[in-house]
Amino acid sequence: MSTRIWHDRFANDWMRAFPLGNGRIGAMIYGDPSRETIEINEESLWSGRQHKENYHSSPEILQELRTLLFQERYEEADQICSQTFLANPASVRFYESFGELQIDFADKREYTNYRKELELSQAIVRVSYQKGNDWYRSEAFVSGNYDVFVYRMSTDGAPFSCRITMQRGQDAYTSALNDDTLLMNGCVIFKGDEIHGEGVEGMQFGSRVYVVSDGKQTADKSSIQIENATQFTIYGAFATNYNVNIFDNDETIPYRKKLLASINAVKDVDYGALKQEHIAEHKRWFDTLSFTLDAPAYEEIPTDERVNRVKNENVEDNDLYVLYYQFGRYLLIESSGKRATLPANLQGIWCNGFTPPWGSDYHTNINLQMNYWPVESANLSDTFLPFVHFVKMISIFGMDTAKELFGADGWVINHTTDIFGRTGVHDFVHCGFFPMAGSWLCLNLWEHYEYTNDRKYLEEIFPILKGSCRFVKDYLVEDCNGYLVTSPSNSPENAFYYQDRSGEKKSSGITYGATMDFEIIHALFTRMITACEILGEESFAEELKEILTKLPPLRISERYGTICEWIKDYEEVEPGHRHISHLFGLFPGDQINETDADMYQAAKNTIDRRLAYGSGATGWSRAWIINFYARLKDGTNAWKHLRQLMRLSTAENLFDMHPPFQIDGNFGAVSGITEMLLQSHKGKMGERIVELLPALPDGWKSGSICGIKARGNFVFDMSWKENKVTKVTITSMCKNTLRLKLTDVCGPIVTRKAYTQQNSVLYMDFAEGETAEITFRPFET
């Protein structure tokens, strides 16, 4: 199993640096033999602070807007939306870099035999090279147990000298406390402007860097010099005064004392023991799943060259997809596991500079949700905890927005948010308006329940789900055909053509009843009905059932045979748009499946039309397409678009490219590959049916995956050969009944465990913790 990314040449490029993390602290290792640079991030370092948003809408304005939309007077409606819906201030601020730890080596000789590697199974970056006859070797990691960054450099006995600094381009200063400690103190200062609001002092932050070596150490005002050493170790602690439990900066947090305590706790620990403890702790997260394909490993070829061979030379490298899969799991662990208290943002926890693309914020019209698509199926459930807390907090802030902006009960969030609880319409109405975002976030919450069957967790999230349902209930209005519809509504970031009353062709992004809304509502309500039945709230379940009967049905376009994106068969302004929102019901939803052959075919036609016009040009959009084709049981096209993701949207360090870097594509691809190998979304909730190898590409003839999860809290170890399942070992983490669909990839069964079979579904009862093995005999020829 490939778990190592490596380069054999250095380039001073952030997109070739290797990421480390412990959920809270992130580090990007450049690997420069002359002047090593390590960019540091801390999950909570943002510009801005909490403040109340102002809205310009009212129930009367909303009613006027709905009247115009039902009359298809879209231009007038668009003007009202733009004037009244945008929050004040209109945009959230930015996630920021913490600064750069730099090690300037006195030895500037040319180097040879360069190697930089990231071992995913250990979460350690190692760099080695020669200068003359002298070998230099470094390794770096971020300890979860001690919550510090650790960097160690050594030679094979040749003495060297260097200068160590911790720098930040703004809002901070560094001073040397003595010859072994650097202190950085900072306060984010942000200027006021029309878009972001007033400027004030924001978050306080600081770092403590401790250096120990076998050489002579001295200090000047802001750096530490090491002379004639053969090894040194750096320990870095980083913190802010952000309080995740109030979603704001907190003057009472003694973050400087925390820095000192962290360094004091780690500095006298034996380095070898510290590293081994780190590796063991990381493996507890990473080793929950292994994946192999019977294919040449090409591990002797640098990873960047392997990526470029796929891009430029049409080389088949199935093992690279295994590495890419495990890299995505690694990124989720390092950005949302271990010490994390906030969910992974648009760039995980790694960003460069102070104004990263899209602010490296939280986009909630697919991106944050996509970050957590693989969290359950790829056996990373513990990385989901920061997401749960985040949505719990957002639901509190979203109550005011629901009431003040829409006159509704419950809670709402739109397209963009930050760590301070912003839930209004931001940036531009056409992209920033998306009141179904909260309901979609709730579906991520539900997935964790379906995969774990944890009743106590369901009780915890039930008020959040119910609050979202209450908002939707109030937001729905009856249209002229007697359907309950969302109004206003949009299909995220796309627009449609219509004819105004004079017959002129115009475009609008705002309407009523966009298809995606009803797919999200259907998914939310059906899950909430199940939750109500489990927890004894039958009356609320009956209300939701009644509403479901009044929602518009999904419609198929008479012109194209595609699923209509809006309530009417409008033509898209961008038929190749990156968002394919009207296929939400195919994935991540489950409303569109083989049980309705016409709708299933319309979903295929929808993808075909989008792709014919260039959709999938962004990394995350291509990743979504992989998931679509997996749900369509089309392994050939799922693999084709995985390959396109590698060719067109993958950097040399395997980061996903929107472009530029955006981490959701990495996570979406992990989800897509998992869906190719196992699915468990069909059937009634609580009685899901598991299907093995539903979309296996022809080129993945033989392989194995151990630790993959199915709904119902089942863990599967599976192997296959010549595109047929040979053996599965199933472990049930709770008392449950397995329902396993026997398809044409499954031969005759051999097992010691009792089972029954109805049609093509095998039923097997499990006690908590019980394991069973099924062998599939080869088909007779």
Image (spheres, rainbow, N blue to C red):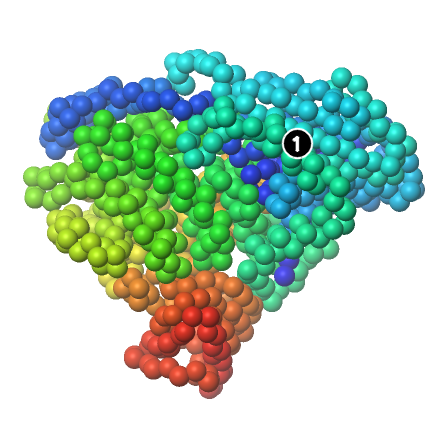
Q: Tell which of 566 and 399 is nearer to you.
A: 399
Residue 224 vertical position relative to residue 680 in the rendered view, above or below: above
Secondary structure beneath dot 1 equals helix
Q: Residue at x 45, y 34 (%)?
A: 244
Q: Residue at x 45, y 58 (%)?
A: 377
Residue 138 in which image quadrant: top right
Q: Residue at x 90, y 32 (%)?
A: 228
For this view, does 321 lie left or right of residue 770?
right
Residue 321 vertical position relative to residue 201 in the rendered view, above or below: below
Q: Report x, y in % for residue 774.
A: 47, 79
Q: Quadrant of the N terminus?
A: bottom right
Residue 628 vertical position relative to residue 127 in the rendered view, above or below: below
Q: Residue at x 42, y 31 (%)?
A: 247
Q: Tell which of 235 and 41 is nearer to you.
A: 235
Crowding at mark 1 (Cα within 10 Å: few <14, some 14-19, many 20+) = some
Q: Report x, y in % for residue 672.
A: 45, 54
Which amino acid, by three-letter code, is at mark 1? Leu
The answer to whether any part of residue 654 appears in the image is yes
Label 1: which residue? Answer: 260
Residue 179 in which image quadrant: top right
Q: Report x, y in % for residue 136.
A: 83, 41
Q: Report x, y in % for residue 358.
A: 46, 29
